[in-house]
Image (cartoon, rainbow, N blue to C red):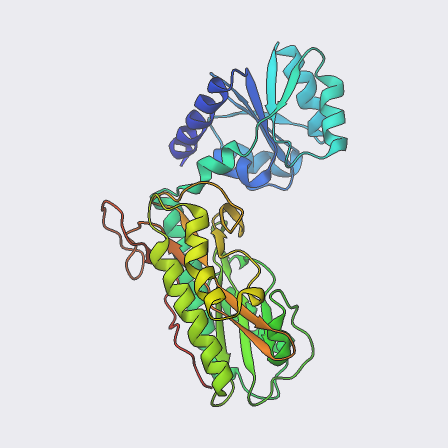
Amino acid sequence: MPEMHAARRDRAQARIAALDADAALVTHLPNVRYLTGLASSNAALLVPASGGCLLATDSRYALAAERDCPDIELLIERYLAPALGRLAAQRGYRRLLFEAQEMTVARYTQFAGEAAGVELAPFGQTVEELRMVKDEGELDLLAEACRISCRAFEELLATIRPGITERQLATDLERGMVDLGAEGLAFDTIVASGPNGAIPHHSPGERSLQQGDLVTIDFGARFGGYHADMTRTVSLGEPAQWQRDTYELVARAQQAGLAAAVPGAVLTEVDAAARDLIGEAGHGEHFKHGLGHGVGLEVHEAPMLGYGCTGRLAAGVPVTIEPGVYLPGMGGVRIEDVLVVGGDVTSGNSRTSGPGGPGDLLTTTTRELLAL
């Protein structure tokens, strides 16, 4: 594991050198974990353009840092920003990059106040870009998170019935994921029944499920720090024609998005493959969120698949494909899966190498409309 993290730091150092900087300060905690292996609520990594890095954390994580990061110099301090600012000045850094998208004004002020003579410049999303393509170990962890999520949902199906509340259903699903080995939840579970299904991020409440409802369930397990994210919509009883038509439209749109998500695809064109189909069916105004996003150490990470996004997909990038149609006062449908772009993931955790092409789904629960 230390070798894997060292290789990641080498790639980050090459980016720092290319930006004509002496060092970069990495403070976004998922980025720190990606580069070091340390999971912490208070940590930062000072990465020079060449040479050894320095990991700063507080005494609560000192032993974990010594265990997980044996090849990195450690600084144990309670207040990291001023300590690292002083260290940057002492080491004579001329130009230092920082994660402006993450650092608060208060921490920046503390750091800059101690970093006398050091020019500070934004690092941008550099580490996030490095994180997009997942290595074999990361895909193993993500596949297990998805496997747990799928199994928990499949076990939940027998309990979805009229009378149970959204909150009860969410709690049962969350307990099931933990019982199956999840280290926690990837995010707060969404259960949206009946008219609440028109709210994409509805918080499950005390509404009881009723016969004739569509029920949208958006959930995911976290395993080894990696986040699953999937959504299924089911029907309580035989679906009405409008419900069936809406579901079939979303299913076609998702299939179009999955087919478009190949290595080299332009992000906006992947989004358009699904969005245009929904728009042509007269429901463009009922699908306003992006088509999907990357998943990994964060449940929402680069790349983002949307109508305003730039860039292209690469092989080995796991993304969600999650079109939806939301009809105010009636309900909604969303179907979401995790796809490894150009991947070669088969059932379970076995893999074969290949040149890419169509991706593979890590979430394998049926996408047919289930009438419960």
Residue 327 lies, in percent from the top left, at 59, 74
**The N terminus lies in which quarter of the figure?**
top left
Depth order, front residue of 29/129: 129
> Residue at the location (62% across, 9% down)?
92
Depth order, front residue of 63/15: 15
Q: Is residue 143 above or below residue 65?
A: below
Q: Is residue 63 visible?
A: yes
> Residue at the location (42% across, 79% down)?
369
Residue 29 lies, in percent from the top left, at 59, 39
Q: Is residue 337 visible?
A: no
> Residue at the location (50% across, 21% down)?
16
Q: Is residue 120 left or right of residue 359?
A: right
> Residue at the location (61% across, 37% down)?
61
How many callouts does the rendering have? 0
Residue 71 lies, in percent from the top left, at 46, 26
Which quadrant would residue 210 be assigned to in this image?
Answer: bottom right
Residue 267 lies, in percent from the top left, at 44, 47
Q: Is residue 37 left or right of residue 365?
A: right
Which quadrant would residue 23 be assigned to in this image?
Answer: top right
Q: Is residue 93 above or below residue 306?
A: above
